[in-house]
Amino acid sequence: MVIAFFTLLLSVILPAPDTLLAQSFGRKNDRNTFIRNVQFNFNIPSARAVGLGGAFVAIADDATAGMANPAGLTILTKPEISSHFKVSRFTHEENAGTAGENDKRRKFRNDVGSQSYLSLVYPSGDFSFSLYRQELINFESSFTAQGFGNVFANPDLDPQQFMFGNDTRSDIQVNNWGAAMAYKPNRYVSVGISSIVSTLEFSFYENLFQESVDLRREKVFSVSSKSNDTRYSVNLGVKVEPVSYLTLGAVFRSGPRFRITNTIEDIDRSAKIPIVQANQNLVFKVPDVYSVGIALRPRNNLTITLDVVRVEYHDIIAALDRNLSEDDVAVSIKQFPYSAFVDGDGIEDLVLDNATEIHFGAEYYFLFGQWLLPVRAGFYTDPAHVVYTTVDDEALRRLFPRAKDEIHGTFGFGFVLQNKIQLDAAVNLSSSVVEGLLSAVFRF
């Protein structure tokens, strides 16, 4: 599943008391802009699964089962190793307006390629064991978007009539190191568990700027981070095969909860202390996922599969300060000579909804001598899971717009030689993500 345009990180800290009054529109709300535009890809890592539209919970019959559904490991009768490679192109939009066209947007693209999965499986009687490394997240983004309006040339400018320029760089990687075990107590049922150690490497930089009267870029706000963390998570799976042509599956996949520290610089050149710097402690919670699936084999060489996947996207922003400044109300604090600002209507200004995805795929095998040649096709729905604002404000709606639902089309093919060597390729196409995958499995 693709988490396209995700909100990233939680718990925005409050400013110090002596800087509270200086929080402008941009400096209050742009504390939150860095949580936008991060795309995560949680698809099953094998080319075969992607070719089937990601509908793999009830199948899970290859070396990626440790992640897809650990109960599926019991179907493997020979030791095997597998390696999987993925190339992704991410596309997102940013504000790129001018004073005359302040709603203008521009597309930015970034490419990432890597080994997405590596595994070893060893079956033994009613048990199967697997060690694997999975690349859960590999996201890179870089863009520079020119702002519009000029706060230096016109200090009385209404803050809702201009946008800061934005120079942003992101590099986020999460790797899962898993040990899986599956057990088949009888011919109908298999159960499995994966114990996972997850590592995070998080690098982020955002510089918000305005052009001065001589066209020099003046920094007004920045967020930077270079953080690492290690956490634990778990996958639980079950497969049931009541008859030979029908398989049911279910998976619960917990997401790790990482700790991240950002450094924030708030710059006001007219103040006595022009640069105010503070650390921001964040929690990045990968969402929990619940999946159920069914695989039907009306013929020996034809499989039709369907998954329903529930993704708890709201986990990402559960601890976020979701109050923006536009509907704040000033409240006098007696013990201090200033006013605080609190949310006036009590309604969350930033929202991220949970979503349910539908994955569907079909696989057909052609037989040519000793060669099996499978072809696959599928699709899956990708409901909008973007942080957006509920505040009726033009500038905020440009910063945090609602996204559109997407549908991904997938296609794949491969070949199998004597059930010992299997090579597969697949593509995944949508408006925000284009992916190509290659998988190799060797059984011995």
Image: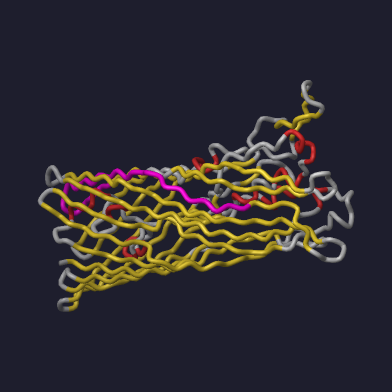
Q: Taking 94 as reference, is 210 left or right?
A: right
Q: Nearer the viewer, residue 22 or 104?
A: 22
Q: Taking 9 as reference, is 357 left or right?
A: left
Q: Is residue 108 above or below residue 124?
A: below
Mostly what secondary structure, the magenta segment? Answer: strand
Q: Residue furthest top?
A: 334
Q: Quadrant of the N terminus?
A: bottom left
- Residue 233 lies in the magenta stretch: yes
Q: Is residue 365 above or below residue 269?
A: below
Q: Residue drawn 28% across and 45% down?
A: 237
Q: Residue furthest left?
A: 125
Q: Nearer the viewer, residue 316 or 104?
A: 316
- Residue 408 lies in the magenta stretch: no
Q: Is residue 224 visible?
A: yes
Query: Where residue 347 appears, x then y in whole percent?
Result: 65, 33
Query: Where residue 40 appears, x then y in whole percent?
Result: 48, 55
Q: Which residues are magenta?
A: 224-249
Q: Taking 378 as reference, is 152 left or right?
A: right
Q: Residue furthest front?
A: 273
Q: Taking 134 as reference, is 185 left or right?
A: left
Q: Is residue 411 visible?
A: no
Q: Residue drawn 63% across and 59% down?
A: 168
Query: Where residue 27 appears, x then y in whole percent?
Result: 73, 46
